[in-house]
Amino acid sequence: MTKKLFIKTYGCQMNVYDSARMADVLAPLGYVATPAPEDADMVILNTCHIREKATEKVFSELGRLREQRRDRKASGQDMIIAVAGCVAQAEGEEIMARAPYVDMVFGPQTYHALPEMVAQATRRTGGVLNTDFPLESKFDHLPEESAGQGVSAFLSVQEGCDKFCTFCVVPYTRGAEYSRTPEQILAEARRLVAGGAREITLLGQNVNAFHGQAADGTVWGLGRLIREMAGIAGLERIRYTTSHPRDMDDDLIAAHGEVPQLMPFLHLPVQSGSDRILAAMNRKHGADDYRRVVDRLRAARPDLALSSDFIVGFPGETDRDFADTLRLVTDIGYAQAYSFKYSARPGTPASGMDGQAPESAKSDRLAALQQLLNEQQIAFNRSTVGRTIPVLLDRRGKREGQLVGRSPHMQSVYLTAPDRLFGTVAEVCITDAFANSLTGGIVTGKHVHQPMERLSA
Ligand code: SAH
Ligand code: SF4
Ligand code: F3S
């Protein structure tokens, strides 16, 4: 008997990957995906705890689900309600207490045990709370993927974090750093490619800290894993995220120059340009260390484009510290970036530090930083106009005949193209650039197809 499953995913790509794997674990129990929560037999909220309001969002979503469950009960059906992910890990007890109608609450390291949890929940002997960090790895217990992920796929190779930046909840919600075995990863990569993937993004909270031990006892770094993956026929593009500046080793940097499949785009979060703030954040690198890593990367791969994460208004951040951040941004020149107001997270060291910044200062700094980053992003996008670049066409657009793809530098490219090109890398001449996207036309010989009209991107 088939049952309907709805998973709502918040947060980072690792949660996207986890949601797909939860569906794999539930498939043998008869669960198939449905696009709407109201007709689902099971709803899982796969949550994120990284910044504030995350928990409140979960509770308001749970309130809605409770209503939908009532409606279903009225028509003789039922709904299992589950909370997974990082809020579940951090606030499991509180969820059980405040929302006793929730059937299952489980952390990111336990979802391989979903069949048992579902059995327990169905017996309705009270809610199931599972926020252990089990000794065995879930990866050794997950079934093979039941469905391909499409043209562009995610593959978790590393999880957890031992860095303990003073602002961050991840070491508490995901647990200690763990690397999967190279054999397991390569087998999964081959299956993804057999299932249609042309691009794989290797994932980890600290992906370049990867140190997977192979069956022969050798320990592989991320550089070696990437070189090995490049040997998989049909895999055209490799990316990885998210990296820590301290773990950019020589072999990985060299791989950027030597492995053509490794795309020339890197998300390398720096958080701040002030050495004082970086020290208070426990980042264990200074602004100049970061500049040097970027110089080495660009020496290996001159067309490398960079992205980053920034936090403004960290406790004690002065105007001068913030000016250092702007200076670093100006020095590096980013193709894109994410920036956030510092958010005090319960239980993290920074939440108790002196000098918590007022909201208005955070807003002002965020606006100034985002203006600079936006200018850089638009300038970067404009620099591609008139050039012909390889675009992996991995999505179908909203309009008839429209395909959407990614440039090597992660820009979204919109174009009109025959559907038979879906899933391939096409040569595209870029005709226009916007803040968040490019438009262009397929190049066939010397002829450029008519580009799309302007998009309000
Ligand atoms: N592992 C990655 C980042 C994981 S969290 C790294 O080391 O860089 C993603 C981003 O969220 C972080 O880079 C940081 O910029 C932001 N972030 C994390 N905790 C935050 C907090 N308490 N307040 C504001 N932003 C935060
Ligand atoms: Fe969080 Fe720092 Fe670990 Fe990144 S490196 S996940 S920011 S503790
Ligand atoms: Fe959020 Fe957890 Fe990812 S807190 S960013 S879902 S690791």
Image (tube, rainbow, N blue to C red):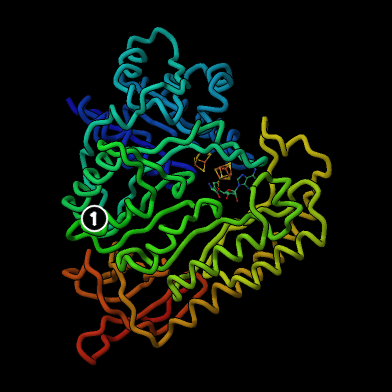
Task: Give SS at disc 1.
Answer: loop
The residue nearer to you, when weighing 30 against 314, is 314
Q: For the point 37% across and 72% down, which residue is it?
A: 413
**Residue 137 vertical position relative to residue 255 in the rendered view, above or below:** above
Q: How many marks?
A: 1
Would you say the beta carbon of the disc 1 residue lies within 8 angstroms of ligand 3? no
Outermost bottom residue: 446
In the image: residue 108, left or right of residue 94: left
Outermost front residue: 217
In the image: residue 106, left or right of residue 153: right
Point out residue 67 in the picture as x, y percentages from the top left corner.
46, 27
When asked about the image quadrant of residue 53, the answer is top right
Whether residue 69 is visible: yes
Whether residue 395 is visible: no
Quadrant, the N terminus: top left
Point out residue 246 in the picture as x, y percentages from the top left corner.
55, 52
* Residue type pointed to by label 1: Ala
The residue nearer to you, when weighing 260 against 451, is 260
Q: For the point 36% across and 23% down, which residue is it?
A: 136
Q: For the point 82% across and 61% down, which residue is it?
A: 319
Outermost top residue: 125
Q: For the point 43% across and 81% down, which residue is it?
A: 384
The residue nearer to you, when weighing 353 against 346, is 353
**Residue 92 vertical position relative to residue 260 in the rendered view, above or below:** above
* Circle 1 residue: 197
When asked about the image quadrant of residue 28, the answer is top left
- Label 1: few (<14), some (14–19) or many (≥20) C-alpha neighbours in 10 Å: many
The residue nearer to you, when weighing 181 against 197, is 181
When asked about the image quadrant of residue 410, the answer is bottom left
**Residue 125 vertical position relative to residue 233 in the rendered view, above or below:** above
Point out residue 358 in the picture as x, y percentages from the top left corner.
81, 48
Point out residue 251 in the picture as x, y percentages from the top left corner.
41, 58
